Structures are given as C-alpha cells and as structure tokens.
Amino acid sequence: MTGMTEELAPYLRPTAILDADHPRVLAFAREKAAGAPDAVSAAVRLYYAVRDGIWYDPYLPFYRPEHYRASGVLAAGRAFCIGKAGLLCALARAVGIPSRVGFADVRNHLATRQLIAFLGSDVFVYHGFTEFFLEGRWVKATPAFNAELCRRHGVAPLEFNGREDSLFQPFNEEKRRFMEYLREHGSFADIPVAAIVAAMRRVYGEERVEGWIRAYEAAGGRSIRRFESEEVIRGEEGAG
C-alpha cells in the first residue's frame, strides 16, 4: 500500500500549471463534488462541470505555461482541449483523486472550414484528455467539447461514468467519420508545454506558428476568432 501511495504521489500534488491548491480551484472542486458518495461519483461530477461549464475555444494562446494554468482557465471559462483536461486534472487533485493528463495526435473529420484553414491541416497535435485513478486503475475522460457545441456539429456529447474510458467517437450521428486517434504521446503529471509547442512547430510549420504567436501578442493574449460561429464541415461517410 505504501508503494502504491508513493507511486501515485506525483498525480496528487499541485504544480505551477495544475494549481490544485489555488483557492478558486479548491472552492470550485469542493462545490461540484459536494455530496458525492465516493471518488467515482466525484470524478463524474467534476467531468460534467468542466465539459459543459468551460467553453471549447481552439483560438486561445498555447505557447506559455500560464496559458494552461487551471485557475486561469476556470476564471476565463474558455479553453481548448489541453486547458480543459488540465483543469479537470487539477480539480480532481483538489478533492484527493489521483489524476494526470494524456495526449494523442488526432485527425478531426468534423471541424469548421475556418479552423482547418487556420491550422493548414486536419491533424490536431497533442489533443489532451484526463486520466483518473479510480477503483485501482486509470480511467480516461475527454471533457473537450461542451454539449452545445456537440449538438451544433451533429455529434453526441461524450458521456463519462467513472468506470469506462470516455474517448471521441469514430463516427458522428450521421455515420460520418468524426475523429481518428493517430499517435499516443503518453501520460504526464504536468502539462509538457515545451513538447506541445515543438510538436506544433513540426506539424504546422515554423512560419505559421510564429504568425499565430504574433497575432496573440497583438491581441493581448485573447482569443482571436469565434469558433462557435464558424461554418461546420462534415466528415467522410463511414461504415455502419
């Protein structure tokens, strides 16, 4: 038991990015998990609070640790997948649930025309999700897309019961390809900002990434587009 406690210790500690000890994070976590009869129920409540309470926004800055800080994401009410996964991780740690962040490259067949043009690709590098240690094993949860956004894109919102992995569906409600997992990057006790930025430069190109950074600096670190009002494009037809 002592060995297991030591093994899980890094996934319970706050960090400068996953600031689970911040008063705002602590208060939110305790409020949302209040009355939960066990850790599984608490994790589920926190999942839905982040999935639907924090709006998905892919047009936010990404190149500094503070861009992912959990307390900042909570205050802003907006984040893309990594910020939402990190916040969920911090909230879980705040109520004593070991948690970590996992990453994978995915191909998104259901996005907006403007976002694909912005990226120059339909591959999303270092897509982030959360992993909870519950009932003796790690369980994946993906809080990225809020329910309203899913309905607009014709995709059922991802559910999470605390016992089964919650990962993106391969097809949307029209049986068209939605999301493919291409490459896993592993799980981390903290958000590896340098690795994420390096991957973006490699996949999207130095010039494009530097252009994004200049745009964010000029905008004072604010979101530079409105994803929720962009033109949805549908994926390829799939089997089934």
Image: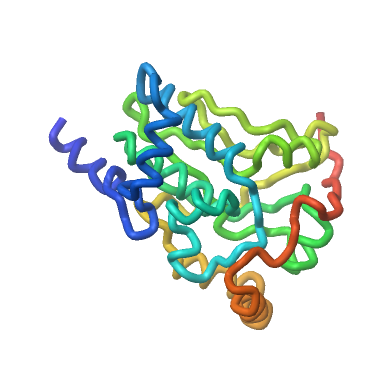
**Residue 183 showing in the rendered view:** no
Look at the picture and state if 84 lies above or below 120. above
Q: Is any atom of residue 85 visible in this view?
A: yes
Question: Residue drawn 52% across and 45% down?
Answer: 129
Q: Pick the residue in front: 156 or 164.
A: 156
Vertical side of 37 occupied by 107: above or below: below
Depth order, front residue of 145/19: 19
Residue 39 position in % (x across, y down): 36, 25
- In the image, residue 215 sits, relative to residue 46, either above or below, namely below
Q: Residue 170, position in %: x, y?
A: 70, 38
Q: Is residue 91 left or right of residue 8?
A: right
Q: Residue at x 60, y 60 (%)?
A: 125
Camera-side residue: 238 or 66?
66
Identify the image quadrant of residue 69.
bottom left
- In-image side of 199 versus 89 (left or right): right
Q: Which residue is located at x 52 percent, y 31 percent? A: 165
Is 200 drawn above or below residue 125 in the view shown?
below
Quadrant housing residue 89: top left
Q: Quadrant of the C terminus?
A: top right
Q: In the current view of this chain or complex, which residue is farthest to the left? A: 2
Q: Nearer the viewer, residue 232 or 239?
A: 232
Residue 227: x and y, percent?
Answer: 75, 55
